[in-house]
Amino acid sequence: MKGTRLNKLMKRTWLTLALPLLIPALLLMACEGTPAQTATAQELIPVTADGTLEPVVYLPLLTNRYNPLAASRTVNVYYADVADVPAEKMHEMSIVWFGQVTNNENYADVRVGYNNTHLYVRVGVIDRYLQYDSAETGQNMEQYDAFTLLLSRDGAGASAPTAQSYRLEVEFSGNTSDPMSQAYTGNGSGWVSNSGLRQEVDVKTSYRGDDLVKNINIRGWSTQYDIPFSSLGLSGRPADGAVWKLAMILHDRDSLSASPLPVKLWTEAAERDIPATWGNLHFGVPGYIPPIMTNVRTTTIREGVNGVEVPDADVGGSGLCGDMVDWRTDWALWGNYNQGFEGDLNVSNEAQMEHWPCYSKYYVSFPLGSIPPGKAILSATLNLYQFGGAGLDQTNDPVYDSLIQVLTVGEAWNEGTISWNTAPLAVENISRAWVQVAETDLCPGIERTWDVSRAVALAYEQGKPANLALYSSEAPQHTGKYFYSSDTGCGADARPTLSIQWGDP
């Protein structure tokens, strides 16, 4: 049974990954923690280093990287009515990502959520070598491993930082709730230090690895911003549908004897000092209101049916936690690995950085040419067929339901070459759905469904395929879910399917 085979491989791989880091992980648990999540419980989702440097002037990285999609990249941030979103509902936070996984390049998963009083941004960085200012001067932070969060309450975006623009920098400082950090506010032409904002925004950093000083078996680091809305001049949470500007800069340094490495950016067109180049932060997730139509029909799109091709691939660790390559020797083998023609796929994520080789996303592209021009989309659903999940044969470990998010993708990609490092960035997150713990060896598996009406309507209007990505913001181990791909040998009924209701406007 495929589920059993994969679960046995997952058990062996999890032990291989976890044992070398078990002691430091236990020691660091109090610092980083594992957000609470009830095993197999379904929830109702509301709609709605050492060394110092001489002072260096920081210059934004200016390159020709224009991409018209960059201006559209949006994080639709979910609201959670709890006291501490990352601690209690990390799996409900919106997920976005950027960067690459190689021996000397970094990648970041960024989770964003909010409640009535705070905006929360949790960053997990895959990084093999960590460097920080042991003198703890808090200066020149961009010259070390650090993260810059850029926010602007002016959703239109200005040509220079205004009084509604905020720059929050944190330097990796080991496992601490008091890392080196700085805060700035715009003044119409540039940035000015804001010590009050720095004190009000709570930040922390942590890492996973065996020896920080010698950089032995380092897996990565994380940081978290807890930002009171009051520190940004608001009396409460933003109104539903409010749009801010958002950008992020991931700074990287691998050796004190060498210069800092090029930064990674979200969005890829972002300039630190020009809010108009940043992406969007939208409070709430837009729904889809279909137009009035008549003569409604249903079209089903699936690989091999009526000659249709539906390319798909998971990227990352898949169901083997990356053990199809020797990633321990060369991280780029994992980041560049292609598995576009495998019959199975996995969607998996978690908060602990030592387990990044198990992270896995899914990409799929549905052509919409079978719907005649000039029609209107009433609704659309994505169906995947599940056969198993991570941890099901480990009776002493809890396993968890997964809240898997669907995001749109603008750029085209090739099934035979797509990898973690080459996969396009998401344009925006558009929906999510629970996938329960389950296992079966019967084809076609267990049907799981996501509402993708808005994504399909937008793609149809633009004359493009419906390009989708699936990922999660889960926190604990054993949340990965296994599905059949377009290349499955389990039969046509097990292949990913897009069902569209459409009609005459």
Image (cartoon, rainbow, N blue to C red):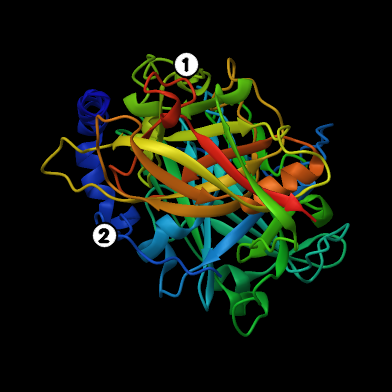
Q: Secondary structure at mark 2?
A: loop
Tell me: 272 left or right of 183: right
Q: Quadrant of the C terminus?
A: bottom right
Question: CB of mark 2 within 8 Å of CB of mark 1?
Answer: no
Q: Earlier in the sequence, mark 2 or mark 1?
A: 2
Q: From this viewpoint, is residue 138 visible?
A: no
Identity, as a three-letter code, of the amino acid under mark 1 = Leu
**Residue highlighted by disc 2:** 38
Q: Is residue 419 above or below residue 173?
A: above
The percent position of residue 470, horizontal first and vertical second, equals: 51, 41
> Which image quarter: residue 360?
top left
Residue lying at 33% horizontally and 19% vertically, measured from the top left:
323
Residue at 53% x, 19% y: name it: 336
Q: Position of residue 375 (x, y in %)?
A: 78, 47
Tell me the amino acid under the disc marked 2: Thr
Residue 432's disc is: none
Relative to 449, residue 209 above or below: above
Numbered circle sitting on residue 333? 1
Q: State which quadrant residue 62 falls in.
A: top right
Q: CA distance from mark 2 to mark 1?
A: 35 Å
Q: Along the horizontal axis of the image, is 61 left or right of 357?
A: right
Q: Nearer the viewer, residue 432 or 183?
A: 432
